[in-house]
Image (tube, grey):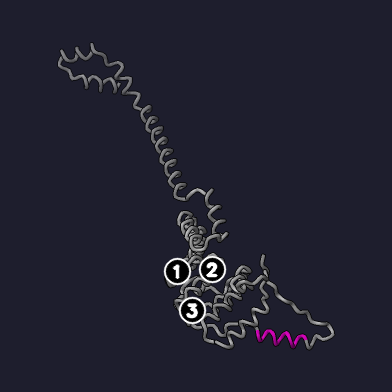
Amino acid sequence: EWRVLEKKEHCDQHRSKECLKVETQKKKKELSCGKPVNHTQYDHLRGIANRNEHGHIPEPEVALIFKKKGSKNSHVDINELEEKLKKMKKDDPNSAHVYNQIGNFWRIKGNTQNSIECFRKALSISPNNPEVLLNMARVLFNLQYLDDAIFLTRRSLVMQTSTQNTWLQHFTLGEILKAYGHYQEAALHFTHALDLNPGFQPAKAHLREMEGTPSPTVTQYTLFIILFLVLGVIFGVITSIEASFDDPGEVKTQRHFNRAMAMRSIKLGINPKLIRMRKMNY
């Protein structure tokens, strides 16, 4: 297992003034992406437009991005990472990659507003950067802005070059579609993610979970058939009730109207219908 380590320094009570001065200096030097950009082509998305209203959602798993390849250490030192990113920003203040990495740093810390602002700055430099688009999508997905997340993920997939692996885009699409309840389509993306990144356990876990979940489409069809049958039964019952409540006066008249009376009326030249009507009037 891997861990995120964050060193905390405590002030000595005997040196409170000096400590306060040091903490103030540290606060001024806090890692940031500078002044927020005025506009990006993605600012119309609700999750980005409402960025100042979001709560903190830490994503410690993002630290895996910064883990050195081949390293035996199972942890990432967050303070060391922060200093490294400060140096990268100082060396290249106009790099979309640097602002993207700082945005990921703030994802680990859980500051969604800072991470979105950093990704916005990266997108103002490189509007179609697939990596930045995907990272922004992940943040908005965690905040449950599903429409925004799926839009950005699909755009990231389109912008990814043919030489780059798209397993994470497909995995993200699978997660979003699963959240929508579109399990069949989600399963296709999880399967594709596994084709591109065999052994990726989270994708396997999602597929196992969905195996026992009935498809919403099948459930809807089942409910429709049941409803149709119930309505048919109700219609049949109503029809039979209406038939049983025929006019009783007409039934009684028909019982008294026998063949002898009909023959007599014919001989006398009387219309049988007139006789029937007279009896009914009485």
Rendered residue at 17%/18% (across/down): 270
Residue 214, compared with residue 268, is above or below; it is below
Amino acid type for the residue under numbered disc 1: Leu
Residue 190 can be seen in this image = yes
Residue type, numbered disc 2? Arg
All told, the count of numbered labels is 3
User: For residue 157, which numbered disc appears in the image?
Assistant: 1
Q: Which residues are magenta?
A: 19-29
Badge 1 or badge 2: first in the primary sequence: 2
On the image, the x and y values in percent for residue 15 come to 82, 86
Tell me the CA gap for discs 1 and 2: 13 Å
Q: Which circle marks residue 138 in the picture?
A: 2
Task: Provide the major secondary structure of the magenta segment.
Answer: helix
Describe the element under mark 1 as helix, strand or loop: helix
The mark nearer the N terminus, 3 or 2, is: 3
> Could you say which disc has been placed on residue 123 in the image?
3
